[in-house]
């Protein structure tokens, strides 16, 4: 039923709850979990700013990923982590289609209130445009 589950992860409390829900589902269905974090760079940005932001953000996510890997291993769930660069909704949707994802799990709100006001929430875009089921965790 849910062979591959993608979790949109930005490090927020909502994303942590989404991961916990996805892990429970993956345990039940023996699914593979793919956690995707997306780095959205400021525009326009200089090469120095881009490199610094990428290094800092990847290091931050890697700490989170280590904790997620331990939780998945304790539940005997296969977990893969990925970091993308670009617009979160676009990258998650693209990855879901390329991977043949059966279910996307995300939090209702992420870290940035301004981004949500400016371009709409990532979860709303995922629900509207995903070609698979989307579970939005509150």
Image (cartoon, rainbow, N blue to C red):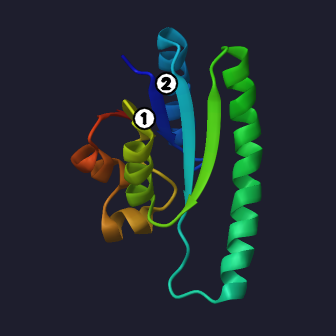
Q: From what the image shows, is residue 93 above or below residue 26?
A: below
Mark 1–mark 2 Cα distance, whole angstroms, equals 8 Å
Q: Few, some or many C-alpha atoms within 10 Å of disc 2 (few <14, some 14-19, many ≥20)?
A: some
Q: How many labels were placed on the picture?
A: 2
Q: Few, some or many C-alpha atoms within 10 Å of disc 1 (few <14, some 14-19, many ≥20)?
A: many
Q: Which mark is residue 21?
A: 2
| Mark 1 touches mark 2? (CB < 8 Å) | yes
Q: Which mark is residue 105?
A: 1
Q: Which mark is residue 136?
A: none
Say which quarter of the image contains residue 84.
Answer: bottom right
Which residue is outermost to the left? 128
Point 36% across, 16% down: residue: 1
**Residue 13 visible to the viewer:** no
Badge 2 marks a residue whose secondary structure is helix
Point 75% across, 67% down: residue: 55
Residue closer to the observer: 83 or 138: 83
Point 54% across, 25% down: residue: 32
């Amino acid at each position: 039923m849910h062979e591959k589950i993608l979790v949109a992860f930005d490090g927020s409390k909502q994303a942590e709850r989404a991961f916990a829900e996805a892990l429970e589902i993956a345990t039940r269905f023996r699914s593979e979990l793919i956690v995707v974090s997306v780095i959205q760079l400021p525009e326009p940005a200089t090469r120095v700013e881009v490199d610094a932001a990428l290094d800092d953000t990847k290091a931050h996510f890697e700490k989170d990923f280590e904790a997620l890997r331990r939780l998945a291993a304790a539940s005997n769930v296969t977990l893969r982590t990925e970091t993308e660069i670009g617009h979160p909704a676009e990258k998650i949707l693209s990855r879901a289609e390329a991977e043949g994802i059966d279910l996307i799990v995300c939090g209702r709100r992420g870290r940035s209130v301004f981004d949500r006001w400016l371009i709409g929430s990532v979860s709303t875009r995922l629900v509207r445009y995903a070609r698979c089921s989307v579970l939005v965790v509150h």
